[in-house]
Amino acid sequence: MTVDQLEELKALWFAFFPGTDLWGITSEQWKEMGWQGTDPSTDFRGGGFISLENLLFFAMIYLMSRNQQLLLPSILQSAFRIFADNYPSVPSLHRG
């Protein structure tokens, strides 16, 4: 994982949980966002890191709206569930 990718993961964290410190790039906190485990970089197998860039873009655009803190986590978690339901052969998505 490159330094830029680490920074993008951190930016994604703060888009979801503004004002909440991230304990580390490997942390139980990532599960709160819907990642499979404590290291979100392992969930990018099929989509590659372009999927991280897409998530970050969506999060940053959404943060410009009025209710970003209330809706962003539930919207992205719903998107993950919809994708997982339609593409069950993709093992890297959290189905919880």
Image (cartoon, helix red, strand yellow):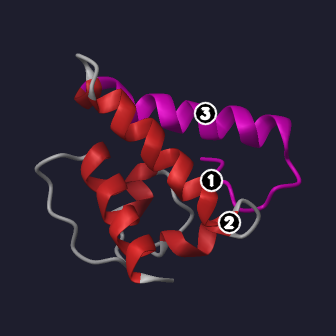
Q: Give the distance between the C-alpha atoms of the residues marked 2 and 1, in whole angstroms.
A: 16 Å
Residue with the mark numbered 3:
79
Depth check, mark 2 against mark 1: the one in front is: 2
Let me know if residue 75 is in the magenta part.
Answer: yes
Q: Which residues are magenta?
A: 70-96
The kind of residue on which mark 3 rests is Ala
Note whether 63 is above or below 6 in the view shown.
Answer: above
Query: Crowding at label 1, few (<14), some or many (≥20) Cα neighbours within 10 Å?
Result: some
Given residues 80 and 54, the one toward you in this image is 54
Q: Whole-percent x and y of residue 32?
A: 38, 53
Residue extending farthest to the left is: 19
Residue with the mark numbered 1:
94
Given residues 25 and 85, the one toward you in this image is 25
The secondary structure type at the circle numbered 1 is: loop
The kind of residue on which mark 2 rests is Gly
Q: What residue is at 73 percent from the left and 38 percent from the top?
A: 83
Residue with the mark numbered 2:
48
Q: What residue is at 31 percent from the left and 64 percent from the top?
A: 10
